[in-house]
Image (cartoon, rainbow, N blue to C red):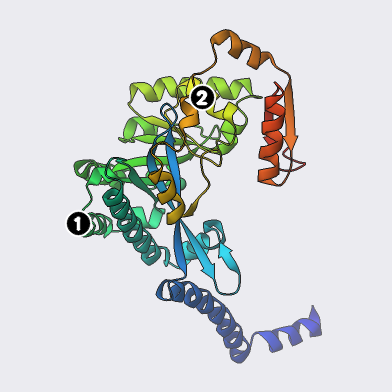
Amino acid sequence: LGLSGHRFIREHFTAEAISRQYYRLIQRAVVKNADLYNAIARDEFELYYQPIVNLGNGRINTIEAVVRWHHPQRGLLHPEDFLPAAEDTALIIPLGWWVLDQACQQLAAWQQQFPEQNCRISINLSTQQFLHPDLLTRLDQALATHQLRGADLVLELKDNTVMVDTSATTGLFMQLQDRGIQICIDGIGTHYASLSFLHRFPVSSLKIDARTINRLDIDAKLAEWLKSLIVMTHDLHIDLVAMGIETAFQHRRTREMGMTYGQGYGFAKPGPAATVTRLLDHSNPFSFLLEPLPSSSAMTHAEDAPLVLVVDDDRSLRKLLTIAVMQAGYRTIEAANGSEA
Ligand code: MG
């Protein structure tokens, strides 16, 4: 580049120019850290809770804790908005311990208030937290502090987390099993080339992702895949949780297929602890599930009914439309936008 290249190097690659750029980069990283770091100190995080429901009897079996951040400038943030940054900066560790403690504290309060409900708490662990040397100590501490049993706690892991270091995972799973703590693999879908980890590790449940559940009606291959997964997991005593249940049809379908639990807006969306307290206070909030299933001839009719695609980006509007269309005797599937449709 001749002279202009020479000038560029002179302007940008002097010790002073480089240190200025470094300083800017570091400042940006530190600000991000400080923001997140202060958020714990300033009590800006809150746990939301979403029930996981027994599809057979409508009872709340487990309550999943999910973290929200009340950001002073940006408002309510969902995990996908800040967990990647927290993972980059290792602040996921203190945040993760905070979640563990808060969730256990909340479960202890619910158990005291509703001893007959007998439900468990489920928390999501990042890979860093799962493989952290303090994990077992922290779990023991949280259980002891809040007087909970290991069986009260479910840890949700991504499948790639358990495959990062399979020998460490094997050891950890044994230690968790000794404590009665259960492991759930979160967000399973057909993109999984292999479910070989099911035979390697004592997993107690699998969550089938919402996308898969949503496409059951229109994708026969997907339904076949799920049927074979149900047979396999049944033999291994692994429960299946259907995520993203929004419609009565999805509920009926997953229940008929033999899935045990369900989670989704059809039951309840994630909300502050008080919303779940109200559900627990109601002896059987999802009792509509107990209505007898239609006879098989009626079901055949339902499966033959014309299929209507309901498209709307507003979830509640979509739900209302779906209900109206279903009441008119049609089957429905839903999409949230044009490309999905
Ligand atoms: Mg989860």
Name the one closer to the observer, 255 or 268: 268
- In the picture, the quarter occupied by the N terminus is bottom right
- In the picture, measured across the screen, residue 253 lies left or right of residue 206, that is right
Q: Nearer the viewer, residue 305 or 83?
A: 305
One can see residue 205 in this view? yes
Q: Amino acid under label 1?
A: Ala
Residue at point 55%, 15% (across, down): 294
Where residue 119 appears, as percent x and y from the top left, is 33, 42
**Vertical arrangement, residue 263 with respect to residue 328, above or below:** below
The C terminus sits in image quarter: top right
**Mark sitting on residue 199:** none
Write the residue at 46% across / 62% down: 87
What residue is shown at x 41% (from left), y 54% (from top)? Answer: 126
- Residue on which disc 2 sits: 226
Q: Nearer the viewer, residue 42 or 216?
A: 42
For the residues marked 1 and 2, what is the alpha-carbon distance in whole angstroms? Answer: 39 Å
Check disc 1: other Cα within 10 Å, few if <14, some if 14-19, many if 20+.
few
Camera sees residue 335: no
- Amino acid type for the residue under numbered disc 2: Leu
Vertical position of residue 15 compared to residue 95: above or below: below
Task: Report x, y in % for residue 13.
Answer: 64, 85
The x, y position of residue 84, in whole percent, is 52, 60
Q: Position of residue 82 (x, y in %)?
A: 53, 63
Whether ligand 1 has any atom under 8 Å from the Cβ at mark 2 is answered as no
Residue of label 1: 144
- Left or right: 11, with 4 as reference point: left
Dot 2: within a 10 Å radius of its alpha carbon, few (fewer than 14), some, or many (20 or more) residues? many
Question: Does dot 1 land on a helix, a strand or a loop?
Answer: helix
